[in-house]
Image (spheres, rainbow, N blue to C red):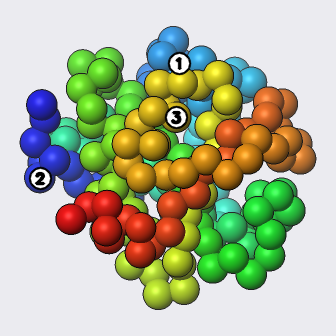
Amino acid sequence: MLDPDKISFRELRFDDLPLLHDWLNTPHVHEWYDKDEQNTLDEIKEKYGKKINKEEPTDSYLIMYDNQPIGYIQTAKVKDWPTLESVVGKNQQAASIDLFIGEPNYLGKGLGSQVIRKFLTVVVFQRPDIIKCFIDPEPSNVRAIKSYEKAGFKYLKTVQIPGEPEPAYLMEIKKEDLVHYVQ
């Protein structure tokens, strides 16, 4: 079992993009994350550069373990993404998260749920206007769903988010549930 105290987060930087490029093109990541994109380095610079430059309302981080990058995680307020807001409702005081573990040596070790709980605690729910968080894996991504359930997310419904090719298995966690769950 890996030590959850060694998990930390660092804002994504331009010099991280070649590493992100490598991860997004590994089979275990590409199967579920940005799978409909070519993921060339130029495309990644364009897409993630907007997040780094704050031209897009998404906060992007590297997941660190023992000060080494092992994955990627992002969060955004639901109100800033009308397509997601259209399926969860307006005025939710909610955020969403999305993530992947990029380093194969860290897969299957129970780290995902620990990363999520820590990120919710130290980043997402530190915002006073956020009281719940959504995540929306594909229904067939059983490994991710189990990790999200272990972190405390509860299934809400399966929905088709406008513009997304696959349905989403919409899950939610409330701030007060995370506090209870972590203790």
Vertical order, 103 against 154 (above or below): above
Mark 2 or mark 1: name the one nearer the start of the chain.
2
State the residue in front, 59 or 139: 139
Separation of residues labelled 2 and 3 (CA atoms): 23 Å
In this figure, which residue is indicated by the disc labeled 3? 145
Residue designated by label 1: 25
**Type of amino acid at the residue the image marks with label 2:** Asp
Q: Is residue 161 left or right of residue 106?
A: right
Vertical position of residue 122 compared to residue 67: above or below? below
* Quadrant housing the C terminus: bottom left
Q: Secondary structure at mark 1?
A: loop
Q: Which residue is mark 2?
A: 5
- Binning the other alpha carbons within 10 Å of mark 1 as few (below 14), some (14 to 19) or many (20 upward) gives some
Contact? badges 2 and 1 (CB < 8 Å): no
Residue at the far right in the pictured view? 162
Q: Earlier in the sequence, mark 1 or mark 3?
A: 1
User: Going by the picture, which residue comes out furthest to the bottom?
Assistant: 128
